Amino acid sequence: MATYRTDEQMEEIGRAFLRGLGLENQVAPDAMTIINKIKRKNDKFNYRRVPDNQMRDAEARWNSDLREISMRESVFTGMQHGDAHPRFVVFHELSHYALGHKGTRNRGTERVRDYSVGDIKHEETEASRLAVILMAPEHLVPENATAEEISEKFGMSLTAAILRKEEIDRIRRRRRGELRPLPESIKEFLRDARAQGIEIRTKLDD
């Protein structure tokens, strides 16, 4: 059965992986640097560029038997140019490697060997979680950084940066023992209730 890892556990996996490559404190390392460093540590690891028309079912793929990441030529080129989406695609496949996922993995949900579709979906989600951690490790993201700043600093799409900021804020609140801020709509509801004479014990910062 698939095991769910907490945000903190995933952060430590990502940090340990980067530390092992000497990149723990490197802001936005390019994916090719990571690939080359893995190759130097593991001579059986490889990557392969595939013409787009010969790889129609996936943008990139991790094959644990071959210890190989294959990627469309357009993904490789975009990664080299620092484009956000191709970088994420490659970091996603690198995450399958870092997490020790077995079989052939891409961002589809087809059955692989004895794995159920549920197991594969779990591993795909897990690889996506780790991908953004490798791209923007929590310990390198400045306090109070906006999603726009995270996107620019770490070479991520704005959508990915928004989600990453939410994860980092959640981790830091837990570390400080803080509660999640109430949505403004809930605060307004409680203010109205207070105005009607109902006792409200929640602090509303007003």
Image (spheres, helix red, strand yellow):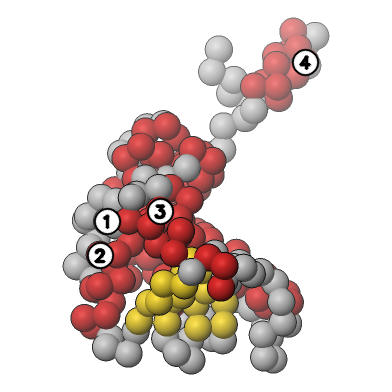
Q: Which mark is residue 193?
A: 4
- Depth check, mark 3 against mark 4: the one in front is 3
Specify few, some or many for label 4: CA neighbours under 10 Å numbering under 14, 14-19, or 20 or more: few
Q: Which residue is mark 1?
A: 29
The structure residue drawn at horizontal position 52% and vertical position 74%, both measured from the top left corner, is 61
Looking at marks 3 and 4 on the same chain, the residue that comes earlier in the sequence is marked by: 3
Verify CB contact (< 8 Å) between mark 1 and mark 4: no
Is 14 left, or right, of 105 in this rendering?
left
Q: Which residue is mark 3?
A: 78
Q: CA distance from mark 2 to mark 1?
A: 7 Å
Q: CA distance from mark 3 to mark 2?
A: 15 Å
| Label 3: element kind | helix
Q: CA distance from mark 2 to mark 4?
A: 57 Å
Q: Which residue is mark 2?
A: 33
| Label 1: element kind | loop
Verify CB contact (< 8 Å) between mark 3 and mark 2: no
